[in-house]
Amino acid sequence: MRWTSETIEELLLELRAHGKDFEDVEVKLGAGGVPQLGDTICAFGNMPNGGIIVVGLDENDGFAAVGVADPGLIEQGIAATARTAVVPPVQVSFQEADVGGATLVIATVSGLPSNQRPCRYQGQAYLRQSDGAYPMSELEIQQVMALRERPRYDPQPV
């Protein structure tokens, strides 16, 4: 998705009305540099449609756009986590957006194909529920693994 000022404003209105993150949207302040996002990136990678990370919004101040000082550093840090800390690596694309003079970094995390799930961060598989990333139980991991290979009965002779 290509973010426009209209789609960003629409997202901000939805976040403010909801009062917290969504299952497929994570908001981070980013004031102290690159936020810790390994579990979130992993959880989005384990979702069929992935998710969106917006860095530069203050959730505690009504999702005010405060921006980030070094967007390139934020993008590099998120990409490094997605490529080296999440196994198998997940794809992330980036876009910078200006909201009221504040620069936001929008990272779109692609969901992995079902035959590559679950991905793991520091050895743990995560999934996203509500506005958080949670460790997957062994049962959930088994269910994901069962979806990796679907039986193909058609090619077999009867």
Image (cartoon, rainbow, N blue to C red):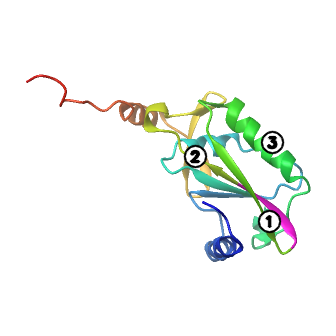
The amino acid beneath tag 2 is: Ser
SS of the residue at dot 3?
helix
SS of the residue at dot 1?
strand
The reply to whether the magenta stretch includes residue 105 is yes
Task: State which region is magenta.
Answer: 101-106
For mark 2, what is the residue?
110
The percent position of residue 131, horizontal first and vertical second, equals 61, 57
Q: Is residue 97 above or below residue 46?
A: below
Label located before the other in sequence (2 or 1): 1
> What residue appears at the point 85 percent right and 53 percent down from the top-left corner?
71
The percent position of residue 62, horizontal first and vertical second, equals 75, 73
The amino acid beneath tag 3 is: Gln
Which dot marks residue 121?
A: none
Q: Main secondary structure of the magenta part?
A: strand
- In the image, taking residue 23 as reference, residue 59 lies left or right, namely right
For mark 3, what is the residue?
76
Distance between mark 3 and mark 2 Cα atoms: 17 Å
> What residue appears at the point 85 percent right and 63 percent down from the top-left corner?
67
For mark 1, what is the residue?
58
Label located before the other in sequence (3 or 2): 3
Tally the numbered discs: 3
- In the image, taking residue 57 as reference, residue 144 lies left or right, namely left
If the image is split into quadrants, where does the C terminus sit?
top left
